[in-house]
Image (cartoon, grey):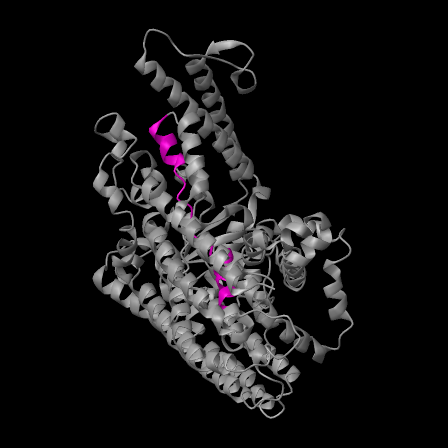
């Protein structure tokens, strides 16, 4: 059983670790040789020059300004100085909205913490239930609901606080949802003109025996969007071409290196061996070797491009379709296009540089199967996640260690080595769980072969009735508070401090700089700014919301540790977003409904677990009143979903029309077709515009007839001016009419 002293040891270790990380970062960040590691964002926008490019030789590597070392914490206020609007312009709305998740955590838990410590902690502390029992307990348990006697009237205080915390959380969620919605609409309205605003990605284009994919796409949209269709670009399967281009790029890099080497020493042309890694083989002139290689690859690339253009099998059943107005694109992107809901699937096109070309032709059935597999995998990951956590925790305590290694018992029980006990119980559980999370993918693969201790908990759940599961979990919640406190300190304190140090990118950059950087281009590529992975980073934050909401009523002592995490993470990630990360994608905050939904789920879980806990305390009078809370919370979620979520899933036609109207008034001579002509051509075909445009079709503004090679189409009864069967086609249509 962890004590306050054990938690103190863990806190001391993690505070020292965090301070060490911050100190190391403060020193490393001001060294000229590390400038590209800690400020890559500014190099990418072209507003920073490396301090290594000028000055004395020593100053190119080491900062000799002693005064700068005394201001080692000045990065913290600097991270808070940039206004939010400027931050959005600098890093995008996604980054600003991501930071608001941490702000939301502070807004929710700061008042909850003060209220819990002012009311719940005295209610819990002033009881002597644990002191008069035979149960092993710690001082922390005296601050929890465990110290309240069974059937006590004091549980009404916890009930009232549960209502207060729920209403406050819902209030802050509603305010933040409205704020982010407003930010998103303002961001979309103020965005500069971009190709994706006029373009829709069409997938699952059905095969046609008479027309190519390009012709069929043109025909379909001229018929169904005659007043708004502008042009389209089919998608090519260019995976083999990508490999050739990448190989040519690598060869060009080596050629640049040897040419630079020769320009510095004209007395001897550089040579190389043609074997593996240049260790053996025929010795040849390096410049001539790579020149010939590049020449041959250029011919192979040209041949592959020609093959792709002429091979129908290289054209994927997908296309980027552009419209004359944003309004027309919005209508197409947000409506069903055909009677068959699995064909002609439309969605907003990503920005051209965000397109992942290899995944554009996944069939509808394959997409459905993949989603099902992911859903099943997610369920099992979530369900079995509690088992290894309990297993890891069971290994990280004194009793388990003594059972596994009896020879250590004399040391562990000797009071002279009490600091070892404090370390094991106060720090080891948190670090064990952190290591487990890092190794989780490998562990899950091994779990199917693992038998014994870990599956005892699963066996317990299987043999319990459904109404007993919440009770079982509710009883164990107060007992796990110290475990999660240590985890928060390891992951949320030391872990966040380690994030700003960027130790891994620093090591990789220095190794690349030492062994692989040959040109200025290599130096730019060695600089890896990284980006925020919203799909992994945001769900991790939700764990802290879940812990805070669950323990706010049960064990309030955990809340200050949560606050430190949210405050520290906000400052650190704001610094990283300003100076380091280069976001590859911009969704305009489209992930906020997921954030809102997960916090709602955490709130409901906390309410259900509190009901299970109070049922074991025989609080018969107060427990039934908790049933209302999940109902209120679910109703609140439904309200927010209907009120705010549409702004995140659809583009309002009103906004699209307003933007189109303003653009027509301010730029009446805009040639939109020319603006969009090359936007969605595969990057590997850039420079091949004239050839590739053979598969790019433009809508004919004045034509009322739709060209088609089809013999008859009941769903598109408009004759083609190109087809010889136009008269017969029209006759068939007339005959089909009643």
Percent of width and height locating residue 285: 44, 11
Q: Please give the range of residues in magenta.
A: 519-545
Question: Which residue lies most toward the top here?
Answer: 267
Percent of width and height locating residue 68: 23, 42
Percent of width and height locating residue 652: 39, 71
Identify the residue shown where x is 39% and y is 21%: 257
Q: Principal SS element in the magenta part? A: helix
Identify the residue shown where x is 50% and y is 35%: 305
The number of numbered badges drawn on the structure is 0
- Residue 650 visible to an observer of this rendering: no
Along the line of sight, which residue is nearer the eye, 669 or 97? 97
Screen quadrant of the C terminus = bottom right
Along the line of sight, which residue is nearer the eye, 135 or 512? 135
Identify the residue shown where x is 48% and y is 20%: 293
Q: Image height check: is 180 above or below 14?
A: below
Question: Which residue lies most toward the bottom here?
Answer: 621
């Amino acid at each position: 059983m962890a004590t306050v002293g054990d938690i103190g040891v863990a806190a001391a270790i993690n505070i020292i670790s965090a301070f060490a990380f911050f100190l190391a970062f403060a020193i490393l960040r001001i060294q000229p040789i590390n400038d590209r590691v800690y400020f890559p964002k500014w190099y990418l926008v072209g507003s920073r020059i490396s301090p290594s490019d000028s000055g004395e030789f020593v100053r190119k590597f080491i900062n000799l300004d002693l005064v700068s070392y005394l201001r080692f914490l000045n990065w913290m206020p600097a991270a808070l100085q940039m206004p939010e609007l400027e931050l959005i312009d600098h890093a995008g709305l996604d980054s600003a909205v991501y930071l608001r998740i941490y702000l939301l955590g502070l807004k929710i838990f700061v008042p909850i913490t003060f209220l819990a410590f002012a009311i719940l902690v005295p209610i819990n502390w002033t009881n002597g239930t644990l002191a008069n029992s035979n149960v092993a307990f710690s001082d922390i348990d005296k601050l929890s609901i465990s110290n309240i006697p069974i059937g006590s009237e004091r549980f009404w205080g916890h009930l009232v606080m549960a209502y207060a915390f729920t209403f406050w959380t819902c209030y802050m969620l509603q305010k933040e949802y409205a704020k982010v919605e407003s930010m998103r609409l303002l961001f979309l309205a103020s965005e500069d003109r971009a190709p994706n605003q006029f373009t829709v990605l069409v997938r699952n284009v059905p095969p046609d025996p008479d027309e190519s994919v390009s012709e069929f796409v043109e025909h379909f949209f001229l018929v169904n969007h005659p007043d708004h269709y502008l042009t389209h670009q089919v998608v090519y399967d260019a995976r083999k071409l990508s490999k050739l281009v990448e190989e040519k790029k690598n060869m060009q890099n080596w050629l640049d290196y040897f040419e630079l080497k020769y320009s510095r020493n004209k007395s001897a042309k550089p040579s190389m061996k043609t074997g593996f890694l240049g260790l053996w083989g025929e010795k040849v002139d390096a410049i001539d070797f790579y020149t010939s290689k590049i020449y041959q690859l250029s011919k192979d690339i040209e041949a592959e491009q020609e093959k792709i253009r002429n091979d129908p099998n290289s054209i994927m059943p997908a296309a980027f379709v552009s419209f004359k107005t944003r309004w027309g694109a919005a209508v197409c992107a947000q409506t069903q296009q055909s009677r068959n809901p699995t064909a002609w699937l439309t969605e907003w096109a990503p920005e051209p540089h965000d397109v992942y070309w290899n995944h554009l032709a996944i069939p509808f059935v394959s997409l459905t199967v993949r989603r099902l597999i992911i859903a099943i995998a997610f369920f099992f990951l979530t369900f079995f996640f509690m088992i290894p956590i309990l297993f890891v925790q069971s290994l990280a305590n004194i009793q388990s260690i003594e059972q596994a290694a009896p020879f250590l018992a004399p040391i562990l029980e000797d009071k002279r080595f009490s600091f070892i006990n404090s370390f094991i119980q106060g720090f080891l559980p948190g670090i064990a769980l952190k290591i487990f999370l890092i190794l989780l993918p490998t562990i899950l693969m091994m779990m199917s072969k693992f038998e014994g201790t870990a599956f005892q908990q699963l066996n317990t759940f299987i043999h319990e009735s459904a109404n007993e599961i919440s009770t079982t979990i509710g009883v164990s919640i107060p007992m796990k508070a110290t475990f999660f406190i240590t985890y928060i300190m390891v992951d949320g304190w030391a872990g966040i401090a380690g994030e700003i140090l960027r130790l891994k990118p620093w090591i990789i950059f220095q190794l690349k700089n030492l062994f692989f950087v040959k040109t200025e281009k290599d130096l730019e590529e060695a600089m890896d700014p990284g980006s925020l992975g919203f799909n992994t980073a945001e769900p991790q934050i939700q764990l802290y919301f879940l812990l805070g909401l669950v323990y706010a009523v049960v064990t309030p002592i955990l809340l200050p540790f949560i606050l430190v995490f949210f405050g520290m993470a906000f400052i650190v990630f704001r610094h990283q977003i300003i100076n380091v990360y280069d976001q590859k994608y911009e969704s305009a905050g489209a992930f906020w409904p997921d954030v809102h939904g997960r916090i709602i789920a955490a709130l409901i879980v906390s309410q259900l677990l509190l009901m299970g806990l109070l049922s074991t305390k025989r609080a018969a009078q107060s427990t039934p009143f908790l049933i209302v809370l999940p109902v209120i919370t679910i109703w609140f979620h439904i309200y927010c979903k209907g009120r705010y979520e549409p702004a995140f899933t659809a583009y309002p036609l009103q906004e699209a029309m307003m933007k189109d109207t303003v653009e027509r008034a301010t730029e009446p001579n805009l040639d939109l077709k020319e603006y969009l002509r090359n936007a969605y051509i595969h990057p590997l075909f850039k420079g091949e515009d004239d050839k590739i445009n053979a598969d790019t079709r433009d809508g004919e503004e004045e034509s009322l007839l739709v060209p088609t090679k089809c013999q008859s189409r009941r769903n598109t009864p408009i004759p083609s001016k190109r087809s010889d069967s136009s008269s017969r086609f029209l006759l068939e249509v007339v005959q089909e009419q009643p």
